Image (cartoon, rainbow, N blue to C red):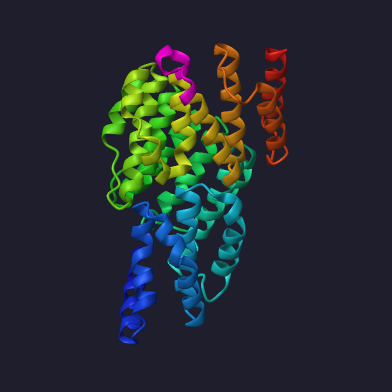
Amino acid sequence: MDMWSWLWEVDSELRENDNDVLANYIDDIPSDTCAGRHKKVDQYADEAIALAQASGLGWVEVFLRHWKLQSNVLHRAKPKDMIREAVVLLELSSREENQDCPQSVCAVQDLASCYSCFDGPGYVEERLAVASENIVKINPGWGCYVCIATEYVSALYDANRLDDCLDYLEQIDKDLVAYGKGKETGHLLLAKVKVLADQGHFDKARKFAKNVRNDSSGNTFRVLTKIYKSYIEAKAGQVKKAIELLPSLKESEISLASMDMWSEVMYIAMIKDESFRTKKNIVCLMSIAKDMLERGTYRQAFNLNAQIIDLMLRFNFDVDFVINDLLSEMKNIQKSLHRDEGASDIIQGIIIASS
């Protein structure tokens, strides 16, 4: 299904009626989001939504709200500020007059992404349910088929069901091929790469990583791919190569949703190689953990703080923060997790190790 054709018609009508401003916003928001120009999106997203509402264009409003969420949640992992927006979009897209809008299905991914960012393991069952319920409503001809499949496999991953991840990814590829499309080379292939790296199949992971591409996802996807390739090498113990491949922190900030993987690479490097065991790097991880907490990615912040404490206990880092401060912060974060999913055991392990 061509999910964009209706937009070209609306775009033409808007320009014929001298509404170039809204037409330009419709044209710009997908490319600005994928290119990582998020500050620009912030400048006009709400105005664009208000213009669509004033014009009585419900489908356009659904489209614009979806891309605002893509920018904030899928790319920048800011669920705390966006969960209300995700619920509004789900309600809007469920209205009878908007149900046939192709982007109405995307509201499912947006809400699942919010759940994932808040607490991926804690919301596994909800994410699996919402993805499975909605993917059966469409077919592989829809662009969002892959998006919803990505949310489903992400939930399987957070449940540590790695073999199920690979089985599901194989089935999606079969569905795509049977429909006359090629195997997925974007986010789903990256998911396969990560699973294979976690299972220790590093050569397979490297092989698949060479085939990763997504021409429509712009600079953000390019940076994301570099982080995944770095992750493979870190997991393989090739930490110097991993750090060489790892994008700079500044470059990686256009894909904050992958900052947990960036931090994981740095954590492994510091464990494996003394040359990376610097105060600068530990302070960098602390800054990332603080940013995660401020954005509302609670499980990521919890896990990263646990890794920071582990590094402190192993290597006696001399930093301004002490272990008890970080442990206290972890206990506070724990209150925001949707489900415990091992958090209590991690805290108890730290208490025993530091006593």
Residue name at image x 61 percent, y 36 percent: 299
Determine if residue 77 is in view. Answer: yes
In the image, residue 215 above or below residue 305: below
Determine if residue 135 is in view. Answer: no
Q: Which residues are magenta?
A: 270-280
For this rendering, which residue is in front, 168 or 150? 150
Q: Quadrant of the N terminus?
A: bottom left
Residue name at image x 63 percent, y 42 percent: 123
How far from the left and from the top, in percent, is residue 9?
Answer: 33, 77
**Res 139 quadrant in image:** bottom left
Assign the magenta stretch its main secondary structure.
Answer: helix
Residue name at image x 57 percent, y 18 percent: 318
Side of 201 where 181 appears, left or right: left
In the image, residue 137 above or below residue 24: above
For this rendering, which residue is in front, 72 or 312? 312
Residue name at image x 52 percent, y 59 percent: 107
Residue 275 among magenta residues: yes
Residue 40 among magenta residues: no
How far from the left and from the top, in percent, is residue 345?
Answer: 70, 23
